[in-house]
Image (cartoon, helix red, strand yellow):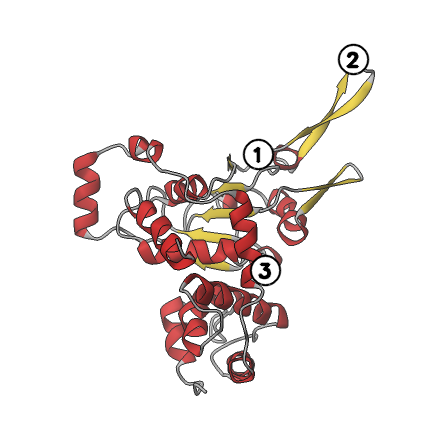
Amino acid sequence: MNRNALFEQVVEQAGTVVLGKDRQVRLCLTCLFARGHLLIEDLPGIGKTTLAKVLSRSLGLEFRRVQFTSDMLPGDILGTSVFDQTSASFVFHPGPIFTQVLLADEINRATPKTQSALLEAMEERQVTVEGETRPLSAPFFVIATQNPLEQHGTFPLPESQLDRFLMRIRLGYPDREAEETLLREGRIERKLSCVDRCLTPDDVLRIQQQIDEVHLSEAVLAYVQDLIAFTRESKHFAVGLSPRAGLALLRAARAWAFLHGREFLIPEDVQQIMPWVVAHRLRSREDLRELPAERLALLMQRVPIP
């Protein structure tokens, strides 16, 4: 089975559990294969946790979930050392971060100190606890869910934390047909238990390596630089995209192209993926609020395509 057919198989299987969200599933897979981390922002009960579970099961990855709360401490995520009377020494007990897919559920209900415990892990795939550095599993993928900031008891993610997420998406309410099916069938646990493994962790690592080889032409590189320059020079944005954001955009575009059967980038790959990669990195100059992905897509149409 070629990679495009395999990709479609995972999307189709996820669609039997997370109804009517094929595009969001494709974006999630793109983020994972691009070695990124994903932020899902939406209301409770939309299906964020279910999406994380079905993807990890489809890809054969170890999955752990952490429910973030205001009284959670960094040690609750990273782990801690406990004195063992038998050996008369301290023994490290790994936290839930030592997994392949970590679901950080309602991450913005934790304090900034606890949120920052994920920074090193997301950037360097390792954690330092009590002076000792420990590597994390490969692949390592964080899916964080976030409630809208208007909700009571939330702490906004700092800029440094937001920048660690390659992509941010929203699921939104299901359409009427999908919701009718969901309401009729009721609980989804049985569907989750029937999800088959389509890939292995080694397959995921192999795909990630192959994505690095997707060809980037001079014309497409110039187009990406024009897009970045537009955000820095436009009157619509308070601050333009950083070089790190440009690297993130290219990684995601390469993954999108690869998963759609191409070994080279075209401008449409960049256009398809850009709103979900850069929207959470930009602020409106008027009120410093984040621009919706849809409005950002319209603004980007002002940059000529090569």
Of residues 175 and 224, the one drawn nearer to the viewer in this rendering = 224
Q: Is residue 299 visible?
A: yes
Residue found at the very far top of the displayed protein: 86
Q: Secondary structure at mark 2?
A: loop
Per the image, the residue denoted by label 3 is 159
Residue at the (62%, 68%) spot, across then down: 244
Residue at the (17%, 50%) spot, across then down: 177
Residue found at the very far front of the displayed protein: 1
Tell me which numbered mark, 2 or 1, is placed earlier along the sequence.
Answer: 1
Residue at the (54%, 73%) spot, across then down: 215
Identify whether 59 is placed above or below 24.
Answer: above
Marks 2 and 3 sit apart, C-alpha to C-alpha, by 43 Å
Q: Secondary structure at mark 1?
A: loop
Given this view, does label 2 or label 3 mark the residue nearer the observer? 2
Q: Amino acid at mark 1?
A: Asp
Marks 3 and 1 sit apart, C-alpha to C-alpha, by 22 Å
Few, some or many residues within 10 Å of mark 2 (<14, 14–19, 20+): few
Given this view, does label 2 or label 1 mark the residue nearer the observer? 2
Few, some or many residues within 10 Å of mark 3 (<14, 14–19, 20+): few
Q: Secondary structure at mark 3?
A: helix
Q: Which mark is residue 126?
A: none
Tell me which numbered mark, 2 or 3, is placed earlier along the sequence.
Answer: 2
- Which quarter of the picture shows residue 222? bottom right
Q: Residue 268 at x, y = what percent?
A: 40, 75
On screen, residue 22 versus residue 160, left or right, reads left
Q: Which mark is residue 85?
A: 2
Residue at the (35%, 54%) spot, across then down: 8
Q: Amino acid at mark 2?
A: Gln
Q: Residue 124 at x, y = what percent?
A: 68, 52
Tell me which numbered mark, 3 or 1, is placed earlier along the sequence.
Answer: 1
Q: Amino acid at mark 3?
A: Glu
- Which quarter of the picture shows residue 96? top right
